Image (tube, rainbow, N blue to C red):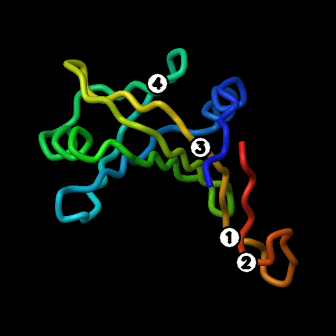
Amino acid sequence: MSITVDLDKLAETLADFAYAYLVTVGDDYRAHTVAVTPVLSGRELHIGSVGNSTRRNAAAHPTVTLLWPPREPGGYTLIVDGGAAVNDDGVSVRPTGAVLHRPATPGVPTASGCGDDCLPL
């Protein structure tokens, strides 16, 4: 299910994170992951120069994921799904959904009952 992204809230949320991982897939559908520093500009996250594998993967399979790890253990991970466009400056991603995710505290029931703690943006 795709969750509508409130870009104002995404911009505010991004302030809590330092860097992200861009996850693309190749023709064999194996994941390729690289560390990046996306910048939100308008409705897109712009990523500077990327390697040949990332460019090739994003062009052939434009559905990508950006994952910002938590700054501290136990914190939320920001996960953004989106559509990628390869350009001369690198890659741009237009978000289609975003969540903050972390493992639930043991013994504490969650709303979903699935053993995690997710907050849609």
Q: Nearer the viewer, mark 3 or mark 4?
A: 3
Q: Amino acid at mark 2?
A: Gly
Q: Give residue 95's position: percent from left, percent from top.
A: 52, 35
Label 4 environment density (alpha carbons within 10 Å; few <14, some 14–19, many ≥20): some
Q: CA distance from mark 2 to mark 4?
A: 32 Å
Q: Nearer the viewer, mark 1 or mark 2?
A: 2
Q: Which residue is labeled 3 in the image?
A: 97
Q: Secondary structure at mark 4?
A: strand
Give the residue at x 65% y 50%.
99
Q: Which residue is labeled 1 in the image?
A: 103
Label 1 environment density (alpha carbons within 10 Å; few <14, some 14–19, many ≥20): some
Q: CA distance from mark 1 to mark 4?
A: 27 Å
Residue projecting furthest to the top: 42
Residue 45 as seen in the image, left or right of residue 6? left
Residue projecting furthest to the front: 1
Q: Amino acid at mark 3?
A: Gly
Give the residue at x 38% y 46%.
63
Q: Which badge, 1 or 3, comes first in the chain's sequence?
A: 3
Q: Nearer the viewer, mark 2 or mark 3?
A: 3
Q: Amino acid at mark 4?
A: Val
Q: Do the CB atoms of the residues marked 1 and 2 lie less than 8 Å apart?
A: yes
Please say if 97 is above or below 31. Answer: above
Q: Which residue is labeled 4 in the image?
A: 39
Identify the image quadrant of residue 103. Answer: bottom right
Q: CA distance from mark 1 to mark 2?
A: 7 Å
